[in-house]
Amino acid sequence: MNQPTSGLRGLPVSDIFTRACDGDRRAIGRVLSIAERGGTDSIELGELAHKLTGNAHVVGITGAPGAGKSTLTGRLAATLAASGRRVAVLAIDPSSPVTGGAILGDRIRMDEHNYGTGTFIRSMATRGQGGGLAVAVPAAIRILDAVGFEIVIVETVGVGQIEIDIAGTADTTAIVVTPGWGDAVQANKAGLLELADVFVVNKADRPGASDSRRDLELMLDLSDTSEWRPDIVLTVGTEGDGVDDLITELARHRQHLADAGQLEARRRRRAQHELRVRAGDALANRLKDALNSAEGQSIITAMASGGASPASSLDRLLDELYPN
Ligand SMILES: Nc1nc2c(ncn2[C@@H]2O[C@H](COP(=O)(O)OP(=O)(O)OP(=O)(O)O)[C@@H](O)[C@H]2O)c(=O)[nH]1
Ligand SMILES: [Mg+2]
């Protein structure tokens, strides 16, 4: 527990990873930082981790700001941990830099909720180069899976395409709404309803929770639920009411995925999304180099002066990008 950070300093990546697999929290934190930073260490880490993945149940918790996602995630994690499950939480902050107030605020708030001793919590923010969260989140999930967490909960605010993409690549996605018609409608507009495997009406201690349930049932009646009909769970995050029902529902969905052969399909979707983002990064870097090269500059000059057509300039540029 109180192992000094210096205990890891200078250790090869493979040793830190081994310690992480043994449950050393500092080592887990360190391997996540290595993955986030990118570079050669992260490539080595990726080679070690990927072979050990495929066991964790990845649960996305998403919904409007202030819906009670963190409170609920805390309860969920603590309850799972109390029953002996190894749980990790990735709390994604979409906008603020890593040093920003929101991250710190969330972290303190989460600690206050006492996630239980079996829980590992990590906040992540949009930053760095390239694909940012779209690359960093799957990488972190893979590591948490590899080091032996059975359940990885990813909390995102359900606004913005990146967050929605992240939520959509979980094995099981829970959409959190609060009482009142507006929330469900907003969630619908944001494209969140299609992603839902479980609906949570949190703050069910407030008036209107049963109306929200009815609204959601009506929306579900209008959509295709032949494969799976999401259940609607009422919770009071602050009290823990309904959390056991939510756990049951998450497990039921996971079982459905396994029975229907869908676990594989979801993982393929996650891999495809991540590959697309990574490829986009790699190609963009290559293109930048090609345009900055002497040949690239000459292609630009020729096209700008009217000496070469756009199509022939593109051909030349592609030759520069992919010499055969
Ligand atoms: N009355 C009531 N309040 C709740 C409930 N769950 C959470 N809250 C309160 O709602 C507020 C927001 O809760 P958070 O858990 O921070 O919500 P969040 O969705 O994580 O918020 P962001 O991460 O900022 O989007 C806090 O003041 C909570 O105490 C609930 O079931 N009932
Ligand atoms: Mg939160």
Image: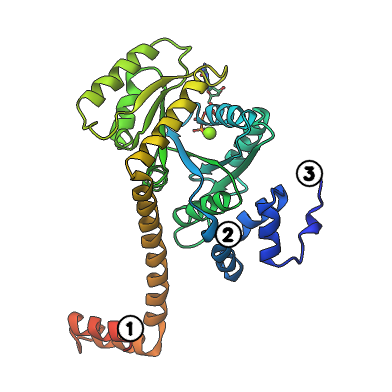
**Looking at the picture, which amino acid does disc 2 mark?**
Ala
> Is residue 289 positioned above or below 141 on the image?
below
Q: Is residue 182 visible?
A: yes
> Is residue 31 positioned above or below 109 on the image?
below
Q: Quadrant location of residue 212? A: top left
Seen as rendered, the residue at the extreme front is 259
Q: Which mark is residue 56?
A: none
Q: Which residue corresponds to the image point at 49% horizontal and 18% vertical from the top-left?
A: 242
Label 1 vs label 2: CA separation?
29 Å
Judging depth in this view, the residue of 142 and 42 nearest the camera is: 142
Q: Quadrant of the C terminus?
A: bottom left
Q: Quadrant location of residue 177? A: top left
Circle 1 packing at 10 Å, graded few (<14), some (14-19), many (20+), is few
Q: Quadrant location of residue 104? A: top right
Q: Where residue 79 sits in the image (x, y, percent)? A: 59, 27
Q: Which structural element holds mark 1?
A: loop
Q: Which mark is residue 35?
A: 2
Q: Where residue 207 sits in the image (x, y, percent)? A: 42, 9
Judging depth in this view, the residue of 299 and 140 nearest the camera is: 140
**Looking at the picture, which amino acid does disc 1 mark?**
Tyr
Asked if disc 2 is less than 8 Å from ligand 2, the answer is no
Label 3 vs label 2: CA separation?
22 Å
- Whether residue 269 sits left or right of residue 27 in the image: it is left
Residue occupied by mark 1: 322
Camera-near label (3 vs 1) is 3
